[in-house]
Amino acid sequence: MLTAEQNDELTDFAPGTPMGELLRRYWYPVAFTRELEEFPVKATRLLGEDFALYKTANGRYGIVPEACPHRRASLAYGIVETDGIRCPYHGWLFGIDGECLEQPAEREETMFRDRVRAKAGKVQELGGLVWAYVGPDPAPELPRFDVFVMDGVRDIGWADLPCNLIQIMENAVDPHHVEFLHGRYFEFMGRQQGFDAPASFGKKHVKVGFDAFEWGIIKRRVVEGATEEDDDWKVGHPLVFPYNMRVGGANIEQMQIRVPIDRYTTRFMLYSVHAPAGIAYPEQAQVPDYNIPVFDEHGRHRTDYVEGQDIMAWVTQGKITDRTVEHLGRSDVGVTMLRRMYKQQMARVAAGQDPLGTIREPRDRIDLPCEKNKFHAGASFALDFIEMASSRFSPQKDALKKLHIEAAENRESGVSV
Amino acid sequence: MTAASDSPAADVGRGWFPADAELHRRDAPKFCPACAQPLTKATGGAGIATEYWVASDRVFVCFCAACGWSGDVVLSTRVTGHEAEH
């Protein structure tokens, strides 16, 4: 339970607020790489602010506030040029760093353009996604987490959800929900709708644990039939502060990305890399992205797949869950730890320090701890995951299943690739 | 939807559990046990106190932004020698 003002502070991402200042210290994926290849400029919204994101013909990316500093027409309808983006209204041209390069209707000798600047952010491409940083300079390095740089077959499901980021992140430090939301509830839905829910999610949690580490919080669990020697406890998987969760198992590596579009909207992205040993991966000219369903034709939540169940739980809490009327128990200690971590990092930013997980030295690859044998379920987890989780909506679902089956057969028969 | 924060007691009297919200506001630690600075926003601090329950115990998970202290403050109705199976 929190007071109303604490809840407001935790969930308000506006510029100048403690949480807004904290969250503006990180890079976020704001587009799929293919989008700017299809059309070189798009509108994007991040942390409650609107931006124009663009890519020049020579491959440089830029991001500026959507409203032109001149008369506030949208630069998301701008003309992308070699040096930057030009406003479609009166032709003001802004460079990659936001400097005003041209004001066609003004006399050049007045140098009025020196007085005007767009507040440009930084943009990079990584792993099929376009990432933006819109906080204060100097920008930290874009963290190259393992899933974004590893070999394998990539697949991105996504949905824009009508709720605040923080209630989604609290779910990432709540292991107990798995055995009910993805276990008993899944079985219930299966009985109602005539499908078999996967057995691996319903195992009872015997013990959960949380450790703060350099990238966030490692979540651990011991499920019935397993021990502390099993991956779920010994390795666990991390909430990657402040907006990601790294999961995986059975040769599927995944980052669950939750982008705070604004206070009431969060883009949920499931960035998966299918990387079974024993098979050569096909080339991917583009990373496939696809919308995952949130509601059915009657306006009810789709809860016949794992992430649809999570989405239902997050969204039905309300746009911003009212933490003044919640009742946390000991099984919610991960939630209390996360709230404390957000506050600790807000205090660091207020003191002029870099918050957790921002890096100043480039690193080629950042490996995150993540269990391989998920829920003590063995190899069947991969096929369960594709069939009963968001990958079932992937345009390459059948190819992914085939990839895992053939890789397993190759491993068993000793075929080397 | 969260209540507006302009009222210092915006949560009290709201929702399904007004008594719990009122007790939370009354009993949450107001000052840091380590440095005595205001702890939470309600008292002018920049830390946090999240409450959870264990049986009849009320546990406040605290962080003080002034000195960095972090710890649990427990309001107990009974002190027990051994933890029961749970």
Image (spheres, rainbow, N blue to C red):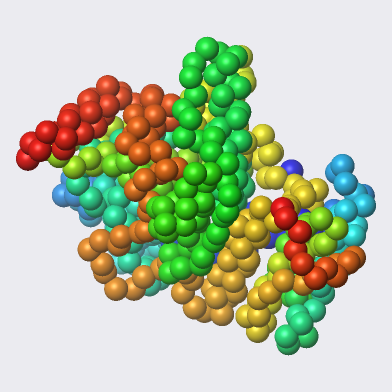
Whether residue A167 is situated above or below residue A190 in the rendered picture:
below
Residue situated furthest left in the rendering: A416
x and y, in percent, of residue A267 in the image: 48, 41
Corner quadrant of residue A16: bottom right
Whether residue A177 is situated above or below residue A240 in the rendered picture:
above
> Residue drawn at (59%, 60%), measured in percent from left and top?
A338
- Which residue is more in the foreground, A219 or A79? A219
| Image side of residue B2 versus residue A363, left or right | right
x and y, in percent, of residue A292 in the image: 44, 28
- Which residue is more in the foreground, A171 or A49? A171
Which corner quadrant holds the N terminus of chain A?
Answer: bottom right
Q: How many marks?
A: 0
Whether residue A382 is situated above or below residue A69 in the rendered picture:
above
Q: Is residue A163 visible?
A: yes
x and y, in percent, of residue B1 in the image: 74, 43
> Residue drawn at (32%, 41%), measured in percent from left and top?
A250
| Image side of residue A194 versus residue A232, left or right | right
- Which residue is more in the foreground, B59 or A227? A227
Q: Is residue A52 visible?
A: no
